[in-house]
């Protein structure tokens, strides 16, 4: 390890101070950064065309994307044969966005619990207080201070996969089948922002079921949709909020809940659907408390523990140093 | 017209070979979803001397439905109207005109009462006493009301006759309505489409001739053999939908490559018809394969009701697309545990039995 003893002591002292300050920050309810961006998925608009999955995979494989591996192209689920129908079973090291389906009975009516069906989009929810970031020992996962996007830095990752265990939504995945594995998850197409781009799933969604935009406006839009009367017509924004493109469509009967407003301390990706979210594969055990809060009471004591160990170690060395010098002399 | 018989040798219509005629009848059986052995039976029915009289009424229409029938090629129109059926009245195809034609219609209805097939083309206006469409000075709604009770079967041919079609588009000033809203005392077979496929009409007529009953109808009165599946299900562009490849605008790369037309407003996912499999004009064309989205002409509430280029709402998930399940299958932990417990019990019993057996053996050895 490089760095002097002096640097290490300085780091420990700073960490202790920061931890004390951070304790106060974390105690108050965290809010997404003012410039936070996110995504609103409306299952009642989704037609299951998988356009988001196809274009997600294509765009994510471009340089800077979570699936980009130099010289390896687009990672399809099946390496051989017909690639027209790329049919992932779940999120994986090759898939960071997937449309799944809930189907019951005859499955003939959309957005109905009995004898009906509903699509659901699964991807990283970009929590306001991400569990994956809090457990990462090397800060390979970090939350962008401006956009709030939870990003991944492969060159820092040590492959401990704590994030996979910590995430309440089961999002981070590991590329088990490569010899230089890494964590893979949706990074909300952050590599496209500098060029004015945004999330590919939203850009290529034909119905506006996936909508990109600032989190505050997405929350307003989601809550507004719950006030619309079923059967009435509404101009659903296409692509991103402020794109000026709309799709006029009939309002379906919503399950009266915006998923992601408070779940797991709030997420930057929100969902609306016509059926309860537990049926769409969201663990009903996920409460409203942010996941890092569960362990914070213990984690925040670590710097003090480190300080205590330093003191104890220094004292121990002082007590035993004379004997060592004697041995060296002999 | 009815007296004219152009029957050739051995009961086969003139102008075509017997082999071609049987082939046609078998093909018709396939369209109707009947087994191939029905072909000869259809042929017998088609050449029987009891050819049904057909009265073809025209209301608010563009004659497109008659035009589509003119383009039927197997059989040709002449075979159809002279040999398969006896087309006794049709404003477009009548040789006579004016009062003469009207008189002939009334006579044919009288002579074939209870036996003729009434086909209606075009919407029926009912506002202001139905004055917006009159034939021979009489509102067509009156003609329909007096003719329908005497017919053996009523077929509404085309979207206008089925529910109102184009003339019933908002604000519908003439009160255009479908035949089944006027004729209440007997089932009306709807064969919607703009235009409908002539073979769907022909198949329905032949089904009735052959089996003496109407084909199975769906909730909107359409024969299930023709309108049983969504256009989306059999569309040749469907793989592009499932793979998320869409033409974004007319003439772009995706459009030229034959990608899915959903984003251009294709109503295939909510329209029931057999266009993708039956096609038109005997040259294998239909709107989607020449690059225009389906506009839902055969679906009430879609065609002429929804904006032409507004994306559709797919009705339900149709094969072959596959999706992962949103929730994994519930586990079977409890039953596994029960099996393990049962296994343990069996094992324990076996051991106990073995021990007791061993003891007995040991005991006998000592004695």
Image: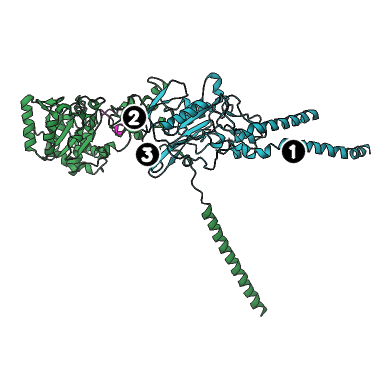
**Picture layout, residue A319 above or below residue B69:** below
Residue A180 appears anywhere in the view: no
Sequence-wise, which precedes: disc 3 or disc 1? 3
Of residues B107 and B363, the one drawn nearer to the viewer in this rendering: B107
**Residue B154: mark in rendering:** none
Determine the secondary structure under disc 1.
helix
The chain letter of the green chain reads B
The question of residue B282 being in magenta is answered with yes
Tags 3 and 2 on a common chain? no
In magenta, the rendered stretch is B274-284
* Category of crowding for the residue at label 3, using alpha-carbon neighbours closer than 10 angstroms: few (below 14), some (14–19), many (at least 20): some
Determine the secondary structure under disc 3.
strand
**Residue A305: mark in rendering:** 1
Of residues B251 and B148, the one drawn nearer to the viewer in this rendering: B148
Of residues B53 and B110, the one drawn nearer to the viewer in this rendering: B110
| Discs 3, 1 touching: Cβ within 8 Å | no
Subunit under mark 3: A
**Residue B283 falls left or right of residue B61:** right
According to the rendering, which colour does chain A have? cyan
Of residues B335 and B200, the one drawn nearer to the viewer in this rendering: B335
Subunit under mark 1: A
The residue indicated by pointer 3 is A109
The residue indicated by pointer 2 is B267
* Category of crowding for the residue at label 2, using alpha-carbon neighbours closer than 10 angstroms: few (below 14), some (14–19), many (at least 20): many
Instruction: Write down the quadrant of residue B286 in the picture.
Output: top left
* Category of crowding for the residue at label 1, using alpha-carbon neighbours closer than 10 angstroms: few (below 14), some (14–19), many (at least 20): few
How far is disc 3 from disc 1 in space, using C-alphas? 58 Å
């Amino acid at each position: 390890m490089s760095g002097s003893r002096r640097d290490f002591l300085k780091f420990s002292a700073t960490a202790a101070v920061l931890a004390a300050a951070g304790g106060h920050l974390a105690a108050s309810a965290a809010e997404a950064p003012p410039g936070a961006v996110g995504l609103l998925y409306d299952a009642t608009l989704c037609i299951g065309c998988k356009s988001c999955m196809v274009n997600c995979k294509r765009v994510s494989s471009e340089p800077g994307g979570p699936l980009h591996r130099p010289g390896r192209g687009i990672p399809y689920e099946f390496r051989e044969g017909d690639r027209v129908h790329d049919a992932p079973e779940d999120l994986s090291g090759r898939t960071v966005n997937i449309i799944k389906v809930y189907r019951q009975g005859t499955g003939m009516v959309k957005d109905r619990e009995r004898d009906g069906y509903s699509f659901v989009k699964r991807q990283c929810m970009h929590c306001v207080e991400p569990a994956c970031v809090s457990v990462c020992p090397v800060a390979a996962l970090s939350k962008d201070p401006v956009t709030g996007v939870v990003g991944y830095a492969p060159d820092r990752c040590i492959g401990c996969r704590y994030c996979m265990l910590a995430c309440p939504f089961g999002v981070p995945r590991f590329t088990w089948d490569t010899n230089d594995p890494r964590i893979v998850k949706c990074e909300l197409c952050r590599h496209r922002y500098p060029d004015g781009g945004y999330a590919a799933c939203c850009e290529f969604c034909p119905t506006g079921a996936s909508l990109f935009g600032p989190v505050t406006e997405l929350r307003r839009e989601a809550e507004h949709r719950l006030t619309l009367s079923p059967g009435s017509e509404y101009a659903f924004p296409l692509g991103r909020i402020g794109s000026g493109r709309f799709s006029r469509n009939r309002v379906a009967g919503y399950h009266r809940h915006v998923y992601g407003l408070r779940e797991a301390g709030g997420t930057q990706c929100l969902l609306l659907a016509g059926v309860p979210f537990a049926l769409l594969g969201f663990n009903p055990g996920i409460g409203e408390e942010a996941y890092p809060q569960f362990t914070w009471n213990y984690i925040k004591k670590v710097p003090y523990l480190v300080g205590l160990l330093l003191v104890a170690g220094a004292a121990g060395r002082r007590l035993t140093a004379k004997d060592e010098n004697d041995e060296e002399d002999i | 017209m009815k007296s004219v018989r152009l029957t050739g040798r051995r009961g086969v219509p003139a102008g075509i070979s017997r082999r071609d005629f049987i082939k046609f009848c078998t093909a018709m059986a396939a369209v109707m979803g009947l087994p191939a052995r029905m072909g000869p039976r259809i042929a017998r029915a088609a050449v029987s001397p009891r050819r049904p009289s057909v009265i073809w009424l025209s209301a608010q229409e563009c004659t497109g439905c008659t035009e589509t029938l003119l383009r039927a090629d197997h059989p040709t129109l002449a075979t159809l109207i002279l040999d398969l059926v006896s087309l006794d009245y049709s404003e477009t195809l009548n040789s006579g005109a004016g009062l003469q034609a009207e008189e002939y219609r009334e006579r044919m209805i009288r002579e074939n009462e209870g036996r003729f097939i009434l086909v209606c083309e075009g919407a029926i206006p009912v506002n202001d006493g139905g004055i917006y469409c009159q034939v021979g000075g009489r509102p067509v709604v009156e003609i329909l009301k007096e003719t329908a009770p005497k017919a053996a079967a009523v077929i509404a041919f085309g979207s206008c006759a089925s529910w109102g079609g184009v003339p019933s588009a908002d604000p519908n000033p003439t009160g255009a309505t479908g035949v089944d809203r006027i004729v209440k005392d007997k089932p009306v077979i709807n064969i919607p489409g703009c235009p409908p496929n002539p073979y769907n009409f022909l198949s329905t007529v032949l089904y009735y001739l052959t089996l003496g009953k109407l084909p199975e109808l769906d909730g909107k009165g359409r024969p299930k053999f023709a309108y049983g599946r969504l256009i989306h299900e059999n569309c040749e562009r469907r793989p592009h939908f499932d793979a998320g490849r869409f033409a974004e605008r007319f003439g772009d790369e995706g459009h030229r490559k034959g990608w899915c037309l959903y984003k251009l407003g294709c109503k295939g996912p909510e329209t029931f018809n057999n266009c993708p499999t039956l096609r038109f004009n005997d040259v294998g064309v239909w709107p989607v394969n020449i690059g225009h989205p389906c506009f839902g002409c055969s679906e009430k509430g879609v065609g002429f009701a929804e904006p032409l280029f507004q994306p559709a709402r797919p009705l339900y998930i149709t094969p072959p697309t596959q999706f992962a399940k949103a929730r994994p299958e519930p586990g079977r932990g409890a039953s596994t545990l029960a099996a393990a417990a049962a296994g343990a019990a069996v094992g324990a019993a076996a051991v106990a039995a073995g021990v007791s057996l061993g003891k007995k053996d040991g005991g006998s050895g000592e004695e």
